[in-house]
Each structure stands twice: as C-alpha cells, then as structure tokens.
Image (cartoon, rainbow, N blue to C red):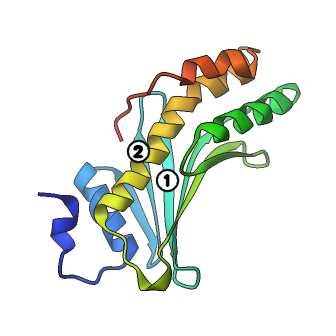
Amino acid sequence: MALSEQFMHEDLHPIDIVEYIAEHHQWDFDRIGEDQIAMVVEGQWRNYTLTLAWSAHDETLRLICTFEMEPPRDRIPALYETLNAVNDQCWAGSFTFWAEQNLMVYRYGLVLAGGQEACAEQIDTMINAAVLSSERYYPALQLVVWGNRSTENAMQVAIAEAYGRA
C-alpha cells in the first residue's frame, strides 16, 4: 500500500503526515507543537536531525536537516566555496553553514499555495532527498574542511550516489 492511501479521504495537517511517516520508518521523533516536528534519521555517515514546520501563512512546509560541523577558521572560505559547488548540483533544496551554531544545514520548502495539500509520498521524498543529499556531500565537505583538499578534488567523491538508510 502506498503511503498516501492511508490518507485518501482525510484532510490532514501536513505535520500529522510527517508524524505518520516517522512512525512508519521507526524514526525517533518529537512533536514540538501543532505545526512542528523534529526527528532523528540514521545515515551511513552520521545521524541527521530533521525539523519540519508548517506555515499556514506562507502555505509552506519547511524542512531543515542539520548535522554538526566545526571547521577550523582558516578552512571556512574553502567550505563556502565547496557549498557553492554542492548547491550547483542540488536540484531541490540547498546547503548553508550556520557558523554560530556550527551546523551544516540542508533546507527545502514545499510550497502548497492555493490550498494544495501535500501527500505522504511528497513529504517522504522530501525527507529522503534531504538525508541522501547530506549523505552524498558529507564526505566531500569533510575532505575540504579536515583533509585540506580542493573543492574540485573533494567533489569527485560526491559524484557517486550515496546510499543511506533514509
């Protein structure tokens, strides 16, 4: 049965659907409020913290996937150069570095303007894309930050698809 068949005749809040998906995948999660949920998804390289929040005003389901990264100060320019290269390859979502929190962040917003409703497959795909993108580019970012590799050299690692457990 497809994920969305569970909700065919129900008008559900997007975060209710996210909660169902988290239960379905047996991910640890915490329903922070009516419009927000946080969960941990295990990947090959590390665990990723995902937060999804619904904004009725913007009609957008926002996803933020984070993992810690504490680059040495002298490698931050190289990290930003690599993030530009990574974002050029990402079709949906983008990465940024929150220096104050030492967090690498993948962000994506699913716009549901005009009263559209998200289906479980859309949300599941959105979550999987965040984790798989993080898995795919994590080694390249590590090589640049800690291995003193060039962006071009490190990005060769990211050419092959990563396979995590999203």
Q: Check whether the beta carbons of the residues at disc 1 and disc 2 lie within 8 A of each other.
A: yes
Residue at x-position 37% and y-position 71%: 118
Residue at x-position 58% and y-position 80%: 58
Q: Three-letter amino acid code at disc 2?
A: Val
Please tell me how crowded label 2 is: few (under 14), some (14-19), or many (20+) other residues with Cα within 10 Å.
many
Q: Three-letter amino acid code at disc 1?
A: Leu
| Figure quadrant of the C terminus | top left
Residue at x-position 57% and y-position 30%: 138
Badge 1 or badge 2: first in the primary sequence: 2
Circle 2 sits in a helix, a strand or a loop, which is it? strand
Please tell me how crowded label 1 is: few (under 14), some (14-19), or many (20+) other residues with Cα within 10 Å.
many
Front-most of residues 37 and 126:
126
Q: Which residue is mark 2?
A: 41
Residue 55 place in picture, x, y as percent? 54, 78
Q: Is residue 99 above or below residue 8?
A: above
Compared across the picture, whether 116 is left or right of 75 comes to: left
Front-most of residues 154 and 48:
154
Give the quarter of the image for residue 31.
bottom left
Q: CA distance from mark 1 to mark 2?
A: 7 Å
Q: Which residue is mark 1?
A: 50
Q: Is residue 142 above or below residue 52?
A: above
Residue extending farthest right? 74
Residue 7 place in picture, x, y as percent? 20, 73
